[in-house]
Image: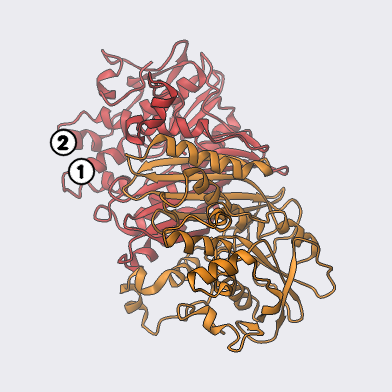
Chain colours: A orange, B red
Amino acid sequence: MRCCLQAVLSPLPVSPTEEAAITVSELGEFGTVERVIARSGLAHTTVVGPGDDAAVLNLGGGLLVASTDLLVEGRHFRRDWAPAKDIGHRAAAANLADIAAMGARPTGLLVGLAMPGDLPIAWLDDLYEGLREECQPFGAAVLGGDVVESKTLILAVSALGDMKGARPVTRDGALVGHRVAVAGRLGYAAAGLAVLGRGFRSPGSVVAAYRRPEVPYAAGPQAAALGASAMCDVSDGLLRDAGTVAAGSSVRIVLDVAKFMVPDVLRDVGTAMNTDPLRWIFTGGDDHALLACFPPHVELPAPWREVGWVEAGTGVRVAGLPDEGRELAGSGFAHWG
Amino acid sequence: MRCCLQAVLSPLPVSPTEEAAITVSELGEFGTVERVIARSGLAHTTVVGPGDDAAVLNLGGGLLVASTDLLVEGRHFRRDWAPAKDIGHRAAAANLADIAAMGARPTGLLVGLAMPGDLPIAWLDDLYEGLREECQPFGAAVLGGDVVESKTLILAVSALGDMKGARPVTRDGALVGHRVAVAGRLGYAAAGLAVLGRGFRSPGSVVAAYRRPEVPYAAGPQAAALGASAMCDVSDGLLRDAGTVAAGSSVRIVLDVAKFMVPDVLRDVGTAMNTDPLRWIFTGGDDHALLACFPPHVELPAPWREVGWVEAGTGVRVAGLPDEGRELAGSGFAHWG
């Protein structure tokens, strides 16, 4: 449920009949997400429905947070790019980060595995070790799941969390004048992916960042306690995810390029790859950093660092870049307000 | 998480090293489920862990129930055998029945969709209509999900439920002397599948039963309130599911064949298909009936009907059949105590 992308694609200029005849790939991933969100209905217990990092339910005694991600081999992971244990860590992290991004604490995972019959059991053992280890710091675990045979290897991971009395922090509460801050690393996993894509295995720090993200889980409940007005998990890239907060909140998010230190290792990999490392920082997912907006008076403790502000308008701009970030965003970036 | 099959397959007689080198298909579905259950860990909040119809978590204010199923096209459903809306109903029912089988009330679904790009949006619309309709009687809904592109069409559905103050009814509480009862239809969906498999579309009642099961949801919380000692969803067939209750509870389940009325429609289809309709009743899944054990003094209200008893021993036997059901169970039935 990282695909929280209301209004990312404009409605197609077709009639309802023509619309129903088009295919999923014609509508695109974000258009399809929008479509199923509109058709999901609303439960009596719904506090936050489909479209945010995670759903929130009122179960009488407390607020439950729930999120689902599908990871498809070849698209979201490759068995030759990471050991099974790291794939387990990544799959768990992708979902647990969605829980943290609501301000909640993870309680457990449900893991559905569709897998080819020739998958070695040893691979499965290692996958579970990774899933389990990623859950351990919270006292969470794999609560249950299902296994089926399939030609394509797919991990369907759902995460559950508990608001523990806090108010869920959604993507639609950012207010003009609020400060924008980030917790966690940006661009490391994207640089690691670029390295792996060229057939290299070093520098180890970025490859490791891709294989096993270091999610700032505790920063989620911390932001909720500090009174964050909006928050999200950065899984589709900072510009894109900031764009969903801007769209959801009907504001403009400004990111100040001067506040983004480019770490030496990203600069070195960028030079080697002939890539501007800012591209990884602003458009890379997979590090699962958190982005949040805070009222101006809030003192931001570590790991939160201020990177911009909220102003009137729409979309996202990067202050300090001549084109305000358009080139970084690239042509594939449909959401520009 | 219907695959609640502790001890269904004996451990393979190999060393740990040899075991890790074998594949998922060599270990088999149930062996693989057992393996991942053993590697799932235990959360601080776990009340019922992996291996039952659904997991149960203590979230302070109440008990949350959660379950996951994967449905793979070609294996669990076929687009040419049922309209998308019915596939939505079935996918929701398969999971909501797991929630009912713990004695809980459903609160919502998370739906992950891995789908080929040429899938018509109209199919997706209809699928969601079915999912939504199956949830409506409970005030539940689709809470969230994820969509990804994949060559294989897979529905990953997780269901959440609320115990509403009741005690979860697991598979491992059956006691010698307790009565065994069933709620809901048996064998209808299997007969419908047999009809569809031969290229027919009638009789309509069994085809409809396959396409859209009529799950006795309310019977789950009702059984919990009546003090049921064990309960499960019949999704792998009555003999197999009763077998997991027997194994979990270290007892023998006896089903009395005289208590199973063969409906006329099943008898007719059986004659036409040259199949003993008892085979569908005792081994068919997909109707999502509920099986439960009750203390002897409990008066059983509708829709519960007594079908047998619990005695000392292991496994399942069908009283009133010369071979106690072995032939019905067939050679594929590994679990015979």
The residue type indicated by label 1 comes to Val
Please tell me in which quadrant of the rendered image residue A284 appears.
bottom right
Please determine whether, in this image, residue A169 is positioned above or below residue B270: below
- Closest to the observer: A134 or A106? A134
Residue at the spot 36% in from the left edge and 58% down from the top edge: B150
Q: Position of residue A30 (x, y in %)?
A: 46, 71
User: Would you say residue B100 is visible in this rendering?
Assistant: no
Determine the secondary structure under disc 1. helix
Dots 1, 2 in contact, CB < 8 A: yes
Q: Which label belongs to residue B195?
A: 1
Q: Position of residue B257 (x, y in %)?
A: 32, 20
The residue type indicated by label 2 comes to Met
B50 with respect to B82 (left or right): right
User: Would you say residue A208 is visible in this rendering?
Assistant: yes
Please report, as a chain letter, where disc 2 is located: B
Q: Residues within 10 Å of mark 2 (few under 14, many from 20)?
A: some
Residue at the disc numbered 2 = B273
How far separated are the C-alphas under marks 1 and 2?
A: 8 Å
Q: Which label belongs to residue A181?
A: none
A124 with respect to A288 (left or right): left
Residue at the spot 51% in from the left edge and 14% down from the top edge: B177
Q: Looking at the image, is mark 1 or mark 2 earlier in the sequence? A: 1
Q: Position of residue B87 (x, y in %)?
A: 35, 53
- Closest to the observer: B321 or A47? A47
Residue at the spot 60% in from the left edge and 45% down from the top edge: A134
Q: Residues within 10 Å of mark 1 (few under 14, many from 20)?
A: many
Quadrant including the C terminus of chain A: bottom right
Q: Position of residue B270 (x, y in %)?
A: 19, 34
Please report, as a chain letter, where disc 1 is located: B
A175 with respect to A148 (left or right): right
Please tell me in which quadrant of the rendered image residue B15 appears.
top left
Same-subunit check for callouts 1 and 2: yes
